[in-house]
């Protein structure tokens, strides 16, 4: 298949395309015009608009409530990054490149996300009393990547200035911050802070010395754009902003080529490690003498994003000498290879290669997992390897899995086996003294004394190990979570074994002070989830006997409680978060033995008009097949019985293979959670006098063919939903609107061309012509040529002449989502105009899949409300003239 390049103005030149709209959309919050509320005027304006005051207040409220989730080493303090609130359009409008999924603020040599989002300060919270203390941060900089030092006495973070990023280190005792870098960072691919485990140094990637000027595109093109199809079947999805030509390749190299460096925190001395290279990831040993460095390799591709490009992970010494290769991943251009192979960072390219490589958290060198090679005649990756179950052809062959240690200087003979399991290990962690190994294998969680590895000490059936420790880089563990998700164990979840930062970095298992017990944190779910909240518990488990003692059990009732952190290794004092449908989440210090609690935080409800709304949950039966699904209904808080309101259905369909498959998704529902309101929460509509209806909207069918009856099931879902809320007396069914984002927008458009129920709709960042996504979409894995009728029937573009009601579309001009190119909305608008339909299209500069800036969010709410007020709340009996708004 020949893949033609996207025109230059839509790749690196996306900024130029966005700029074309600048005349209509001036920058700055000062240009957001507050007008007297005239819906038609709002819809026609070509400047950013503002919604009614109550909506603006909810959308822009500074959401800086405190959650104690980032503790230091001894859990005496927690760290909070203060949010700046919704970012402004100025930050998003700063010139940038998009290169095959890599977004670059080229002026500051960093990932664009560090420019568009960040904190405005750092706050320390005392664990014992909840007292707040502000850390000094540099003026004019956004803060990101804040990370505790291993001893918990310092905090390193990135300070992102307009033209550069530097590393600062804050002293907890004084609250003062010190800049430790003179040369700015190259924070494009490596955009976080990494301490060495001894806390003496920080590893980073700096701009290279004597860096040349950025490559410049020739003033006149030097040749055609060239694409080949070489006979391979490359059924790729529609990726945004792919590399266009050799110039884009050079540009990617320029912003990836960095200098690995080790910076002494105390002296600020910089030690350069090796020569500049194309570094995408780095991880230092405890003493900073060795480095795991991942670099990008060539060739590059015009067909797939950078995440599919080839990489090689190597071990370097402190002088930059390559000692060994850990894993090499080739360029992956074929469909189905969208992610890095193996089980995460350090994953193996084959199932018998090194996987889950980590610096040894309890000793020297590296540790990793490695399965024995597949028997002759059997391919890598068969079912036996993945779970120890029967192999192909009815064979029932298990392959042994091993924990290996790799010692410096990391030669082929420098490895030794620490433990061997009979089947695939999904998670592994050490005790702090390195004498005990904890293993999750299939559905068994057990301990092994390495002095006697043949003896397995059961900890829990179906338990798992905390894969990512609180405040740590991550446990030495596989990608699985054990068997605790199995249906037979679902309501008897044994819990997750807890870990903490180890003496050599990484994560080790939390042991009681007498080293005889471990702790499992879990959640007990009720089959009666509609009336009983999930209950969190902590069990102390004796390692030798496996005997469990319940340390903590959340009380039943109308308050949901979760464990945030243990302040000591015996779980005698813990911090819990408590919330209810009427109470915002706050943290409490609980003495486990006495049950006494001290409130540590006093958080705020930012949107009482929404959180105090009346909420209903209704089980609906779909006509035709009696499939049952749930509908959430939100009514204004002053709603009175018998009052029928204009209604808005806001939805996002999901595919299921059966009723049981759907029912399983409801099991973890927490009926006592507080209704947090985000800037784009659909419940905000209740402030405008609407009832908000959010159905689950299941699309059901056998695996691989779930969408064969999509349109019919969409109709019947809407039939059942509308009939039910009408019968309940909540809605005036003659005044209904519908809306959704992304796949919800696609389904909104389908609803409006295939049903007569809706006066108006809102569809954002959607795809309306499935022939433009021929190689699968959402959970549909058949391509267009395998399911042509399904693709066609599900494409509302082909039914534009049947649209009933007025449709407002919005689309982000820099939408990077797979399969929702802005061209879809442009062509849909063209089709609707040609058919004389009532429609509008608003396209937002600088925004990705779902607007994020203050200006765009406020403008959307203003136009949404104006649209539904005009066509849903106060519809006119006669047909309106076509409204066409295309900036």
Image (cartoon, grey):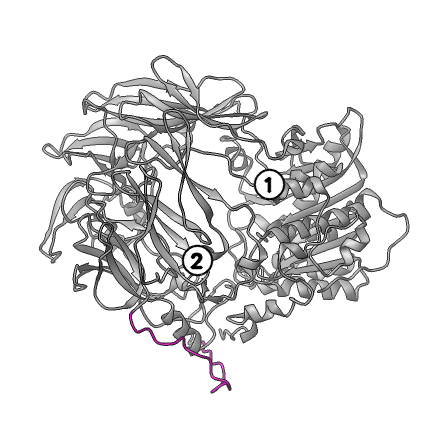
Of the numbered discs in the image, which one, if any, rests on residue 475?
none
Q: Main secondary structure of the magenta part?
A: loop
Q: Quadrant of residue 189?
A: bottom left
Q: Position of residue 812 (x, y in %)?
A: 61, 59
Q: Residue at x 25, y 19 (%)?
A: 547
The residue carrying pointer 1 sits among few (fewer than 14), some (14 to 19) or many (20 or more) residues within 10 Å by Cα, namely some
Name the secondary structure under disc 2: loop
Position of the C terminus by quadrant: bottom right
- Mark 1 or 2: the one toward you: 2
Residue located at (69% from left, 65% from top): 24
Magenta span includes 451: no
Front in this rendered view, residue 242 or 559: 559
Q: Earlier in the sequence, mark 1 or mark 2?
A: 1
Q: Position of residue 259 (x, y in %)?
A: 28, 65
* Left or right placement of residue 597 versus residue 94 in this view: left
Residue interval drawn in magenta:
209-229
Q: Is residue 192 left or right of residue 515?
A: right
């Amino acid at each position: 298949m020949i893949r033609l390049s996207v025109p230059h103005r839509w790749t690196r030149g996306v900024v130029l395309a966005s700029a074309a709209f600048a005349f209509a959309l001036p920058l700055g919050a000062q240009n957001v015009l507050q007008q007297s509320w005239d819906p038609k005027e709002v819809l026609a304006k070509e400047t950013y608009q503002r919604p009614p005051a109550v909506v603006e207040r909810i959308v822009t409220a500074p959401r800086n409530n405190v959650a104690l989730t980032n503790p230091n080493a001894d859990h005496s303090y927690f760290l909070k990054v203060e949010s700046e609130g919704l970012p402004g359009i100025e930050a998003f409008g700063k010139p940038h490149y998009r290169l095959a999924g890599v977004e670059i603020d080229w002026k500051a040599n960093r990932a664009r996300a560090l420019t568009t989002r960040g904190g405005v300060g750092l706050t320390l919270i005392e664990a014992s009393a909840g007292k707040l203390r502000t850390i000094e941060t540099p003026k004019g900089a956004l803060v990101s990547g804040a990370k505790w030092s291993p001893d918990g006495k310092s905090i390193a973070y990135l300070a992102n200035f307009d033209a550069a990023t530097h590393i600062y280190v804050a002293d907890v005792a004084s609250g003062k911050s010190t800049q430790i870098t003179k040369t700015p960072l190259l924070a494009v691919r490596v955009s976080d802070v990494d301490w060495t485990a001894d806390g003496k140094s920080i590893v980073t990637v700096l701009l290279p010395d004597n860096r040349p000027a950025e490559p410049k595109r020739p003033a006149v093109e030097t040749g055609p754009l060239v694409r080949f199809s070489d006979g391979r079947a490359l059924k790729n999805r529609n990726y945004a902003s792919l590399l266009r030509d050799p110039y884009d390749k050079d540009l990617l190299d320029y912003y990836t080529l960095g200098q690995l460096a080790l910076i002494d925190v105390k002296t600020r001395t910089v030690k350069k490690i090796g020569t500049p290279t194309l570094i995408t990831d780095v991880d230092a040993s405890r003493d900073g003498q060795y480095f795991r460095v991942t670099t990008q390799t060539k060739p590059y591709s015009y067909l797939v994003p950078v995440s599919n490009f080839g990489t090689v992970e190597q071990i370097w010494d402190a002088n930059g000498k390559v000692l060994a290769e850990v894993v090499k991943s080739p360029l992956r251009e074929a469909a189905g290879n969208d992610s890095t192979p193996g089980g995460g960072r350090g994953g193996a390219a084959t199932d018998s290669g090194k996987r889950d490589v980590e610096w040894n958290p309890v000793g020297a060198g590296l540790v990793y997992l490695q399965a024995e090679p597949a028997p002759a005649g059997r391919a890598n990756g068969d079912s036996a390897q993945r779970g120890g179950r029967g192999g192909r052809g009815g064979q029932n062959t298990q392959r042994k899995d091993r924990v290996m240690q790799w010692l410096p200087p990391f030669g082929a003979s420098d490895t030794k086996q620490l433990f061997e399991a009979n089947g695939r290990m999904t998670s592994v962690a050490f005790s702090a003294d390195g004498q005990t190994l904890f293993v999750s294998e299939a559905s068994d969680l057990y301990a092994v004394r390495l002095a006697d590895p043949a003896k397995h000490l059961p900890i829990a059936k179906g338990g798992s190990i905390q894969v990512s420790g609180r405040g740590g880089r991550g446990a030495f563990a596989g990608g699985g979570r054990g068997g605790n998700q199995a249906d037979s164990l679902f309501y008897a979840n044994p819990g997750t074994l807890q870990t903490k930062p180890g003496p050599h970095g990484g994560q080790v298992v939390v042991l009681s002070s007498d080293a005889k017990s471990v702790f499992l944190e879990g959640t007990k779910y009720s089959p009666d989830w509609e009336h009983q909240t999930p209950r969190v518990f902590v069990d102390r488990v004796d390692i030798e006997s496996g005997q469990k003692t319940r340390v903590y059990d959340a009380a039943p009732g109308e308050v949901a409680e979760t464990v945030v952190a243990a302040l000591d290794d015996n779980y005698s004092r813990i911090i819990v978060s408590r919330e209810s449908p009427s109470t915002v989440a706050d943290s409490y210090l609980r003495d486990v033995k006495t049950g006494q609690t001290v409130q540590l935080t006093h958080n705020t409800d930012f949107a009482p008009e929404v959180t105090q709304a009346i909420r209903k949950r209704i089980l609906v039966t779909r006509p035709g097949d009696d499939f049952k699904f749930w509908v959430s209904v939100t009514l204004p808080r002053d709603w009175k019985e018998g009052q029928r309101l204009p209604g808005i259905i806001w939805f996002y369909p999901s595919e299921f293979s059966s009723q049981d498959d759907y029912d399983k998704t409801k099991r973890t529902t927490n009926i006592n959670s507080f209704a947090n309101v985000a800037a784009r929460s659909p419940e905000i509509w209740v402030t405008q006098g609407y009832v908000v209806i959010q159905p689950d909207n299941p699309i059901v069918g056998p695996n691989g063919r779930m969408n064969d009856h999509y349109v019919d099931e969409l109709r019947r879902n809407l039939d059942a939903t509308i009939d039910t809320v009408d019968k309940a007396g909540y809605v005036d069914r003659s005044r209904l609107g519908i809306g959704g984002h992304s796949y919800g927008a696609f389904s909104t458009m389908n609803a409006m061309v295939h049903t007569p129920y809706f006066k108006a709709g809102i569809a954002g960042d959607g795809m309306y012509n499935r022939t433009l996504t021929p190689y699968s979409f959402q959970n549909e894995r058949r391509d267009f040529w395998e399911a042509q009728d399904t693709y066609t029937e599900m494409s509302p573009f082909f039914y534009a002449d049947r649209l009933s009601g007025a449709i407002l579309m919005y689309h982000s001009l820099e939408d990077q989502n797979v399969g929702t190119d802005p061209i879809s909305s442009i062509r849909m608008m063209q089709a609707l105009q040609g058919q004389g339909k009532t429609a509008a299209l608003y396209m937002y500069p600088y925004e990705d899949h779902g607007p994020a800036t203050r200006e765009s969010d406020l403008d959307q709410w203003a136009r949404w409300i104006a649209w539904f007020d005009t066509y849903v709340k106060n519809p006119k009996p006669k047909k309106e003239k076509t409204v066409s708004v295309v900036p």
